[in-house]
Amino acid sequence: MTADAKDTWPADQEQHVLLKVEEAAKRLQVCRATMFKLIGSGEIESVQIGRLRRVKPSALDDYVSRLSARQGQVA
């Protein structure tokens, strides 16, 4: 990993391969329930490890990109 990539992460957070649902919700500044709705509807991709649900950081980036594209079409 380059130093530049690491600099984009908040200083108080370690870079994780997968995020807890609560961590993903915090990144999008939504509540836990909203994040579970987005996951359940398929708008945000997630993986299940045993009984745990995790979200790839890239899935959040993809979701935000789709939102931006949709809003660009509406405007």
Image: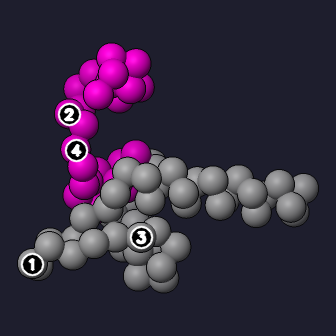
Of helix, strand and loop, which one carries label 4? loop
Image height check: is 3 above or below 48? Answer: above
Of helix, strand and loop, which one carries label 3? loop
Residue 73 position in % (x across, y down): 86, 61
Which stretch appears magenta?
1-27
At label 2, which amino acid type do we have?
A: Glu
Query: How much space separates mark 2 and mark 3, taking CA atoms?
Result: 21 Å
Q: Which of marks 1 and 2 is nearer the N terminus?
A: 2
Q: Residue under circle 4?
A: 16
Q: What colour scheme has been applied to the protein in the rendered image?
A: one colour
Query: How much space separates mark 1 and mark 2, taking CA atoms?
Result: 23 Å
Of helix, strand and loop, which one carries label 1? loop
Q: Earlier in the sequence, mark 1 or mark 3?
A: 3
Q: Residue 14: which numbered mark, if any?
A: 2
Residue 39 is one of the magenta-drawn residues:
no
Left or right, residue 21 beside residue 60: left
Q: Give the farthest residue toward the front.
A: 1
At label 1, which amino acid type do we have?
A: Gly
Residue 25 position in % (x across, y down): 37, 55
Query: How much space separates mark 4 and mark 3, taking CA atoms?
Result: 16 Å
Name the residue located 71 percent from the left edge and 53 percent from the top edge. Answer: 68
Quadrant assignment for the N terminus: top left
Q: Residue 45: which numbered mark, if any?
A: 3
Name the residue located 54 percent from the left edge and 57 percent from the top edge. Answer: 62
Of helix, strand and loop, which one carries label 2? loop
Q: Give the farthest residue toward the bottom.
A: 41
Query: How much space separates mark 2 and mark 4, taking CA atoms?
Result: 6 Å
Q: Residue under circle 1?
A: 50
Residue 8 is one of the magenta-drawn residues:
yes
